[in-house]
Image (spheres, rainbow, N blue to C red):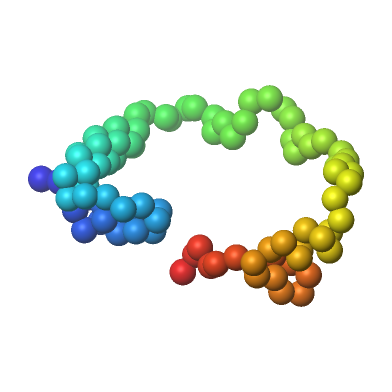
Amino acid sequence: MSSISIEDVKKLAKLSALTISDTEADALRNQLDEILGFVSKLSEVNTLGIEPTYQVTGLSNVMREDEVVDYGLDRDALLRNTPNQQDGQIKVKRVIE
Protein backbone atom coordinates (compact mmCIF):
# COMPACT_ATOMS: atom_id res chain seq x y z
CA MET A 1 0.00 0.00 0.00
CA SER A 2 1.19 3.48 -0.86
CA SER A 3 1.92 5.93 1.94
CA ILE A 4 1.23 8.92 -0.29
CA SER A 5 -1.89 9.37 -2.41
CA ILE A 6 -2.31 10.73 -5.92
CA GLU A 7 -4.27 13.60 -4.35
CA ASP A 8 -1.27 14.40 -2.14
CA VAL A 9 1.00 14.44 -5.19
CA LYS A 10 -1.39 16.73 -7.08
CA LYS A 11 -1.57 19.05 -4.06
CA LEU A 12 2.24 19.17 -3.88
CA ALA A 13 2.35 19.93 -7.60
CA LYS A 14 -0.16 22.76 -7.19
CA LEU A 15 1.78 24.21 -4.25
CA SER A 16 4.91 24.03 -6.41
CA ALA A 17 3.09 25.78 -9.27
CA LEU A 18 3.56 22.71 -11.49
CA THR A 19 1.08 21.22 -13.91
CA ILE A 20 1.33 17.43 -14.08
CA SER A 21 -0.67 14.74 -15.86
CA ASP A 22 -2.24 11.75 -14.11
CA THR A 23 0.56 9.56 -15.50
CA GLU A 24 3.21 11.92 -14.11
CA ALA A 25 1.38 12.07 -10.77
CA ASP A 26 1.44 8.27 -10.54
CA ALA A 27 5.15 8.13 -11.39
CA LEU A 28 5.90 10.84 -8.83
CA ARG A 29 3.83 9.01 -6.21
CA ASN A 30 5.99 5.91 -6.73
CA GLN A 31 9.20 7.96 -6.50
CA LEU A 32 8.01 9.75 -3.36
CA ASP A 33 7.08 6.40 -1.81
CA GLU A 34 10.64 5.19 -2.43
CA ILE A 35 12.09 8.34 -0.88
CA LEU A 36 9.84 8.06 2.18
CA GLY A 37 10.88 4.42 2.50
CA PHE A 38 14.55 5.40 2.56
CA VAL A 39 13.85 8.13 5.12
CA SER A 40 11.92 5.73 7.35
CA LYS A 41 14.95 3.40 7.39
CA LEU A 42 16.90 6.17 9.12
CA SER A 43 14.73 5.71 12.20
CA GLU A 44 16.02 2.13 12.44
CA VAL A 45 19.67 3.19 12.74
CA ASN A 46 21.13 2.69 16.22
CA THR A 47 22.59 6.04 17.27
CA LEU A 48 23.19 5.25 20.94
CA GLY A 49 26.53 6.67 22.01
CA ILE A 50 26.80 8.88 18.92
CA GLU A 51 27.21 12.56 19.72
CA PRO A 52 24.88 14.85 17.74
CA THR A 53 26.70 16.68 14.95
CA TYR A 54 25.22 19.83 13.48
CA GLN A 55 28.21 20.99 11.46
CA VAL A 56 31.83 19.94 11.26
CA THR A 57 33.79 22.94 9.96
CA GLY A 58 33.84 25.03 13.13
CA LEU A 59 32.91 28.05 11.03
CA SER A 60 29.91 30.20 11.80
CA ASN A 61 28.13 32.70 9.55
CA VAL A 62 30.96 33.27 7.09
CA MET A 63 29.82 36.21 4.99
CA ARG A 64 31.37 38.67 2.61
CA GLU A 65 31.14 42.42 2.85
CA ASP A 66 28.43 44.08 0.77
CA GLU A 67 29.74 45.98 -2.19
CA VAL A 68 27.70 48.57 -4.08
CA VAL A 69 28.03 48.09 -7.84
CA ASP A 70 27.17 51.08 -10.02
CA TYR A 71 25.85 49.87 -13.36
CA GLY A 72 25.31 53.43 -14.55
CA LEU A 73 21.54 53.01 -14.69
CA ASP A 74 19.09 55.65 -13.53
CA ARG A 75 16.59 54.19 -11.04
CA ASP A 76 13.75 56.46 -12.14
CA ALA A 77 14.32 55.59 -15.80
CA LEU A 78 14.23 51.90 -14.95
CA LEU A 79 11.01 52.29 -12.98
CA ARG A 80 9.39 54.11 -15.92
CA ASN A 81 9.95 50.97 -18.00
CA THR A 82 8.12 48.67 -15.58
CA PRO A 83 4.53 47.76 -16.36
CA ASN A 84 3.47 48.10 -12.73
CA GLN A 85 5.02 49.92 -9.79
CA GLN A 86 4.03 51.05 -6.33
CA ASP A 87 5.86 53.28 -3.85
CA GLY A 88 8.97 53.37 -6.01
CA GLN A 89 9.22 49.60 -6.31
CA ILE A 90 8.38 47.13 -9.06
CA LYS A 91 5.05 45.46 -8.33
CA VAL A 92 4.65 41.82 -9.41
CA LYS A 93 1.87 39.25 -9.18
CA ARG A 94 1.60 37.35 -5.93
CA VAL A 95 3.22 33.93 -6.22
CA ILE A 96 2.27 32.59 -2.79
CA GLU A 97 -1.34 32.07 -1.80
Q: Position of residue 7 (x, y in %)?
A: 21, 58
Q: What residue is shown at x 78% (from left), y 70% (from top)?
A: 88
Name of the residue lying farthest toward the left? 1
Q: How many marks?
A: 0
Q: Which quarter of the image is occupied by the N terminus?
A: top left
Position of 71 relative to 8 (above/below): above
Q: Quadrant of residue 93?
A: bottom right
Q: Position of residue 28 (x, y in %)?
A: 25, 42
Residue 32 appears in the rendering? yes
Left or right: where 66 falls relative to 25: right
Q: 14 or 91, which lies in front?
A: 91
Q: 58 or 61, which lies in front?
A: 61
Residue 37 appears in the rendering? no
Q: Position of residue 13 (x, y in %)?
A: 33, 53
Left or right: where 38 falls relative to 75: left
Q: Position of residue 36 (x, y in %)?
A: 28, 40
Q: What residue is shown at x 36% (from left), y 28% (from top)?
A: 46
Q: Quadrant of residue 63?
A: top right
Q: Quadrant of residue 43?
A: top left
Name of the residue lying farthest toward the top? 57
Q: What residue is shown at x 26% (from left), y 56% (from top)?
A: 10
Name of the residue lying farthest toward the bottom? 87
Position of 83 relative to 25 (above/below): below
